[in-house]
Image: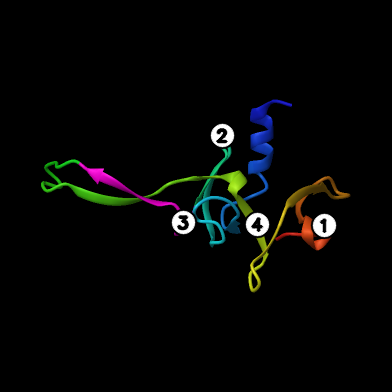
Amino acid sequence: MSAQHTLRSKARRIRKGDMVKVIAGAKKGTTGTVLSVDTRTGRVLIEGIGVGTRHIRPSQLNPTGGKKDIHVPMDISKVALVVDEKTAKTSRVGVVTKADGSKARVAKALKNKEIK
């Protein structure tokens, strides 16, 4: 299996709108909602996490220049899906094929219980 194929299959397990918890890095332990997932690069944008500053050059529209807050994406391997929002319990995510041929995401920590 190529690295690109592995990256895309992992990216499918986290979707836009999911509640995730950061499990590695400077923001470890914080939770947030996924704003977008980039399957090509394996990165996710999380609401309120990874906010950076970009310096704006002076222009006719903005003659003084200044600073602007931007969202910085985080690697998908640093986040885990939150299955219980009250306790912030996380789980690995698997994909199973149902009897009718459709695929569903399941939470491994909940003994393969289907996720919305």
- In the image, 12 versus 42, the foreground residue is 42
> What kind of residue is marked 2?
Arg
* Residue stretch rendered in magenta on the structure: 46-56
In three-dimensional space, the C-alpha distance between marks 2 and 4, rounded to whole angstroms, equals: 20 Å
Q: Overall secondary structure of the magenta stretch?
A: strand
**Residue of label 3:** 49
In three-dimensional space, the C-alpha distance between marks 3 and 1, rounded to whole angstroms, equals: 29 Å
In three-dimensional space, the C-alpha distance between marks 4 and 3, rounded to whole angstroms, equals: 15 Å
For mark 4, does the 10 Å Cα neighbourhood hold few (<14), some (14 to 19), or many (20 or more) residues?
many
Mark earlier in primary sequence (3, 1):
3
**Residue of label 2:** 40
The residue lying at 68 percent from left, 48 percent from top is: 13
- Farthest front residue? 26
For mark 2, does the 10 Å Cα neighbourhood hold few (<14), some (14 to 19), or many (20 or more) residues?
few
In three-dimensional space, the C-alpha distance between marks 4 and 1, rounded to whole angstroms, equals: 14 Å
**Residue 17 percent location from the top left of the image:** 57, 58
Mark earlier in primary sequence (4, 3):
3
**Residue of label 1:** 112
The residue lying at 44 percent from left, 52 percent from top is: 50
Mark earlier in primary sequence (3, 2):
2
**Residue 76 percent location from the top left of the image:** 59, 45
Mark earlier in primary sequence (1, 2):
2
Mark earlier in primary sequence (4, 1):
4
Q: Is residue 58 left or right of residue 114?
A: left
Q: Is residue 7 above or below residue 35?
A: above
**Residue of label 4:** 81
